[in-house]
Amino acid sequence: MNEVQKKRVELMKENIVDACRSKGISVEDLLEAIINLLGKEPPPGHTPETTSKPKTEAKKSIEYRIMKLFREIGIPVNIKGYEYIKESIIYVLEKGNVAVTKELYPYVAKKYGTTSSRVERAIRHAIIVAWNRGNPDVLEKYFGFTIDPAKNQPTNSEFIYMIAEVLKIHAI
């Protein structure tokens, strides 16, 4: 590798670390996710050790399945709604049927240090992006005829509950 390539790689590493920190993801968790995606053992001296709060294997599995589904649907990872929807789905899977505006949004807002209205707006934005940029065949596969044709896209609660239902039924 020449000097320019080395500098680019170093800059990429710094950007990845900064992105992980801003999203509350430890670098070790990121490394573990990459290793799992590649299906390989970690390189010597790079055994992931959880430095953030420990997660159960079941929760990691659910998060992985949600991330895989989001990628397929077309929700970009770089928007806030991505994390808010992911957290909302996990909450719904754990608690069952909850009041979205009265319980779910306040829970997510408190966890991320924001307001319920910002959570609602970010989730709506993520759904709009998925509907505008996502693969129509994939959206049809998961949402089918459950969406009001006049609105063209699901409401926040329809989206959250439909994805939660898909995760319960299918081993994605």
Image (cartoon, grey):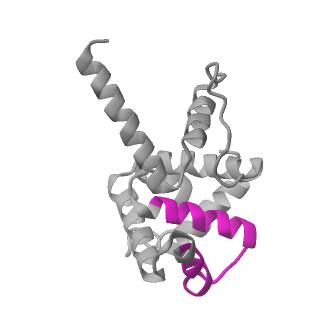
Side (left or right) of 143 relative to 12:
right
Which one is in front, 107 or 164? 107
Toward which corner of the image does residue 151 lie, by quadrant? Answer: bottom left
- Residue 92 sits inside the magenta stretch: yes
| Residue 78 located within the stretch drawn in magenta | no
Q: Is residue 115 left or right of residue 47?
A: left
What span is colored magenta in the figure?
82-108
The residue positioned 51% from the left and 69% from the top of the image is: 112
97 and 166: which is toward the camera: 97
Q: Position of residue 83 (x, y in %)?
A: 50, 60
Q: Quadrant of the C terminus?
A: top right
Question: Magenta region, mostly helix, strand or loop?
Answer: helix
**Is residue 51 or residue 82 the one in the foreground?**
51
Residue appearing at x 59%, y 60% in the figure: 163
**Image quadrant occupied by the N terminus:** top left
Q: Quadrant of residue 166?
A: bottom right
**Image-based side of 44 in relation to 130, left or right:** right
Percent x, y for residue 104?
Answer: 60, 78
Up-down relation of residue 27 to residue 2 (above or below): below
The spot of residue 42 in percent (x, y) is: 63, 24
Count of number-bearing discs: 0
Residue 111, given in percent of the width and then of the height, sits at 57, 71
Q: Residue at x 55, y 77 (%)?
A: 110
Residue 140 placement, left or right of 134: right
User: Residue visible at 37% across and 67% down?
Assistant: 125
In the image, residue 32 above or below residue 89: above
3 or 66: nearer the viewer: 3
